[in-house]
Image (cartoon, helix red, strand yellow):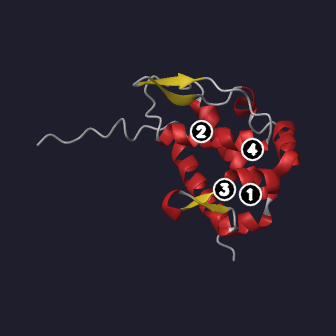
């Protein structure tokens, strides 16, 4: 029996594995901090949008911009994978206009790594920057929210 070649499955941009670890722990912390909602079949999902609009708000978005933490995410966010008929394609999206949009861009970086398959990836030349900036946005959100950070760091 010929072994399966796992090279493509194990190929991530630099820090891609770090983003996946930070992202999953962040999402857990959101749910544990009360930012969860009922999803399909009443399974809990992280409510990123409520966290963004109720906790981070405009000052967070302005701080990320002022500190230069995510210039690529802010000016040229990751493309969105779509279906055109039955064919996979990529769609350019508009830059984030607020903190909710910024966290959508962060989630899209993660989603593109996990679900996008990187087939014909138009962002391949900037994935390293997108990944690094997504991590920085998540870490800045933790620095901005002590309770969420305590859960993330297992300090309860």
Give how far across and how far down residue 51 sits, in percent: 74, 55
Label 4: which secondary element:
helix
Q: From the image, tell me which residue sits under label 4.
A: 100
Q: Nearer the viewer, residue 46 or 12?
A: 46
Q: Residue furthest bottom?
A: 156
Horizontal relation, residue 109 to residue 69: left or right: left
| In the depicted structure, whether residue 44 falls above or below residue 131 | below
Residue identifier under label 1: 142
- Mark closest to the chain's N terminus, 3 or 4: 3
Callout 1: helix, strand or loop?
Answer: helix
Q: Residue at x 60, y 62 (%)?
A: 28
User: Spatial distance from mark 1 to mark 3, Cα to Cα?
Assistant: 15 Å
Q: Is residue 115 visible?
A: yes
C-alpha gap between disc 2 and disc 1: 19 Å
Alpha carbons under labels 3 and 4: distance apart: 11 Å
Q: Is residue 15 left or right of residue 152?
A: left
Q: Position of residue 145 (x, y in %)?
A: 79, 61
The answer to which image quadrant residue 58 occupies is top right
Where the N terminus falls, by quadrant? top left
**Residue, disc 3:** 47
Q: Quadrant of the C terminus?
A: bottom right
Disc 2 + disc 1, Cβ < 8 Å:
no
């Amino acid at each position: 029996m010929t072994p399966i070649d796992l090279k493509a499955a194990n190929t991530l941009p630099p820090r891609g594995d770090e983003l996946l670890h930070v992202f999953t722990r962040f999402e857990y912390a959101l749910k544990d901090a009360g930012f969860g909602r009922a999803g399909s079949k009443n399974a809990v999902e992280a409510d990123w949008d409520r966290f963004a609009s109720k906790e981070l708000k405009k000052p967070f978005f302005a701080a990320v911009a002022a500190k230069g933490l995510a210039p690529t995410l802010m000016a040229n966010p990751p493309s969105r994978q779509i279906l055109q008929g039955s064919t996979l394609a990529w769609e350019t999206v508009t830059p984030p206009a607020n903190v909710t949009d910024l966290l959508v861009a962060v989630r899209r970086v993660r989603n593109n790594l996990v679900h996008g398959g990187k087939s014909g990836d138009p962002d391949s030349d900037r994935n390293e920057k997108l990944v690094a900036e997504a991590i920085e946005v998540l870490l800045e959100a933790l620095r901005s929210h002590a309770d969420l950070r305590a859960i993330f760091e297992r300090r309860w």
